Image (spheres, rainbow, N blue to C red):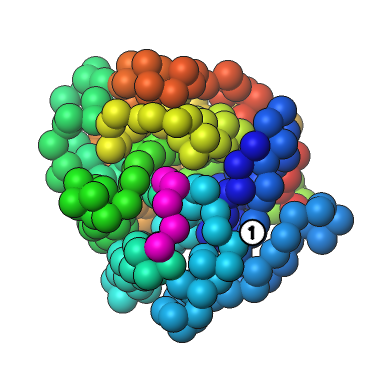
């Protein structure tokens, strides 16, 4: 049993991490930090705190009083302008590192990175943790900067840091800022209005889609495994799926048989990064983790959560 502090506990990944911690037979004590309390029926302890605007000294005091044996940073933003992305994905990470040092707590910091940190690789190539980092979007650049802050602090002995580079999560609660979440929302609206067409950006790229429940179990394993040799681990399904296939699967699950049209207003990253699939050998060796949910199960969970 461990005492674990989850930052950004009310977000997509944070919510699923809390569920995974509750389901872990070890019976961990979970302390949740977020801008607002979620799931009030659960017995978790909540600390209301805004990482973006909260006082640095107050965050250190929170950590000093909580005395967590591991800190999981699920905070961050996937969309927004550059100052917003820098604030959420870089400055907050720096604040968390500073607070951990100021509080004098031991244990591990698990930072959630992103596959967007890698950039383009040759099609058919599984991306290992040693692959060059060449992000093509402001989001990828800021996530890489946060990951490097954790890696540098860990290498300097300032903390025990571990970065999980998450590929493309799919599942319940996925926001419209992600393509599967946007597709599901547009399918729902088309069904409600009788529209026979939905329009998205390019669906030609191949991506590694991983169930958000699998992501959560990887995060818990990263926080609770006593010794992890590597500073960075990939979390994905290990398979590259054409994005159009995912949208068509969602449409079939929803019963939408209209036109799925591709426009020119999609993410530039789709053209610049046509292929991504994770090499999962290292996380399998070091955490004993493997993904367990297939894509249909992930798409069904996503669709059931769309309102």
- Could you tell me which residue is drawn at 47 percent across and 30 percent down? 225
When the figure is inspected, residue 265 is found, relative to residue 246, above or below; the finding is: below
Q: Where is residue 8 shown, x and y percent of the image?
A: 55, 60
Q: Where is residue 49 shown, x and y percent of the image?
A: 58, 74
Q: Is residue 143 visible?
A: yes
- Could you tell me which residue is drawn at 30 percent across and 45 percent down? 116
Q: Nearer the viewer, residue 65 or 75?
A: 65
When the figure is inspected, residue 61 is found, relative to residue 39, above or below; the finding is: below
Q: Is residue 241 visible?
A: no
Residue 38's image quarter? bottom right
Q: Secondary structure at mark 1?
A: strand
Q: Which residues are magenta?
A: 104-108
- Could you tell me which residue is drawn at 17 percent across and 31 percent down? 131
Q: Where is residue 181 shown, x and y percent of the image?
A: 57, 47
Residue labelled with disc 1? 32
Secondary structure mostly taken by the magenta-highlighted segment of the chain: loop
Q: Nearer the viewer, residue 109 or 166?
A: 109
When the figure is inspected, residue 250 is found, relative to residue 33, above or below; the finding is: above
Q: Seen in the image, is 219 located left or right of residue 31?
A: left
- Could you tell me which residue is drawn at 71 percent across and 28 percent down? 25
Crowding at mark 1 (Cα within 10 Å: few <14, some 14-19, many 20+): many
Residue 276, magenta (yes or no): no
Q: Nearer the viewer, residue 45 or 192?
A: 45
- Quadrant showing the N terminus: top right
Q: Where is residue 275 shown, x and y percent of the image?
A: 28, 30
Residue 297's image quarter? top right
């Amino acid at each position: 049993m461990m005492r674990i502090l989850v930052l950004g506990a009310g977000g997509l990944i944070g919510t699923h991490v809390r569920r995974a911690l509750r389901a872990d037979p070890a019976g961990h004590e979970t302390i949740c930090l977020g801008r607002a309390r979620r799931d009030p029926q659960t017995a978790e302890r909540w600390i209301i705190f805004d990482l973006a605007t909260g006082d640095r000294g107050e965050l250190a005091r929170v950590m000093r009083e909580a005395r967590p044996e591991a800190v999981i940073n699920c905070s961050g933003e996937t969309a927004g302008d550059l100052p917003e992305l820098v604030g959420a994905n870089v400055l907050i990470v720096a604040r968390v590192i500073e607070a951990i040092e100021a509080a004098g707590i031991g244990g591990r910091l698990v930072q959630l990175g992103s596959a967007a940190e890698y950039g383009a690789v040759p099609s058919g190539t599984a991306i290992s943790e040693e692959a060059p980092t060449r992000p093509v979007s402001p989001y990828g650049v800021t996530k890489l900067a946060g990951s490097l802050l954790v890696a540098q602090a860990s290498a300097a002995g300032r903390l025990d840091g571990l970065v999980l580079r998450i590929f493309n999560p799919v599942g319940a609660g996925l926001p419209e800022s992600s393509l599967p979440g946007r597709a599901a929302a547009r399918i729902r609206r088309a069904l409600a209005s009788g529209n026979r067409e939905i329009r998205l950006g390019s669906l030609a790229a191949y991506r590694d889609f991983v169930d958000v429940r699998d992501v959560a179990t990887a995060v818990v394993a990263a926080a609770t495994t006593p010794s992890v040799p590597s500073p960075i681990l990939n979390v994905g399904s290990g398979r590259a799926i054409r994005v159009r296939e995912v949208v068509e699967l969602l449409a079939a699950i929803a019963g939408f048989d209209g036109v799925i049209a591709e426009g020119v207003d999609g993410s530039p990253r789709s053209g610049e990064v046509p292929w991504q699939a994770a090499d999962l050998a290292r996380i399998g060796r070091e955490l004993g983790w493997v993904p367990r949910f297939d894509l249909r199960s992930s798409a069904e969970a996503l669709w059931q959560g769309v309102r």
